[in-house]
Image: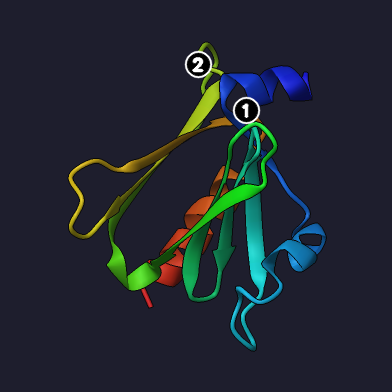
Amino acid sequence: MGLLDGLLGHGTAVDTASLERRLDGILIPGETARLAFKIIRDVFVFTERRLLLIDVQGVTGSKVEFMSVPYRAIVRFSVETAGTFDLDAELRIWVSGTAEPIARTLRKGSDVRGIQRALAEGVLR
């Protein structure tokens, strides 16, 4: 079901230790990946200071965009849990200066509370 979830755009949790090599040189000293989710080839990484969006592009995946969103730029966020008939959880993040939110669908069973807690800790500090 993992491949099917990926093709449908559903997020799955990623072990942050496995991201260390990929984030080498991107994270600043003392910054660590606290929570991460993968959607097909793209990854959302929550650190103590920012939300890092890794967008793998192209057929070979050799072109990668790293978007860094400091928590202070996040003006609001919404996390909708999965229900009985709606098996997906929804994540929306509004960034200052943009009209449309960053939106992702997470599959049922994803750490929705962890995501909400990571965003709240970053935004509300």
Name the amino acid type tagged 2.
Answer: Asp
Please state the horizontal and vertical placement of residue 88, each as a whole percent of the image. Answer: 53, 24
Cα–Cα gap, marks 2 and 1 = 9 Å
In the rendered image, which quarter contains the C terminus?
Answer: bottom left
Q: Residues within 10 Å of mark 2 (few under 14, many from 20)?
A: few
In the rendered image, which quarter contains the N terminus?
Answer: top right
Please state the horizontal and vertical placement of residue 114, each as a whole percent of the image. Answer: 59, 54
Name the amino acid type tagged 1.
Answer: Lys
Please state the horizontal and vertical placement of residue 45, each as a whole percent of the image. Answer: 59, 58
Q: Residue at x 24, y 41 (%)?
A: 100
74 with respect to 109 (left or right):
left
85 with respect to 61 (left or right):
left
Asked whether 74 or 118 is in front, the reply is 74
Q: Residues within 10 Å of mark 1 (few under 14, many from 20)?
A: some
**To which residue does mark 2 refer?**
86
Q: Find the residue positioned furthest to the bottom.
A: 29
Colour scheme of the picture? rainbow
**To which residue does mark 1 refer?**
108
Q: Residue at x 39, y 70 (%)?
A: 70
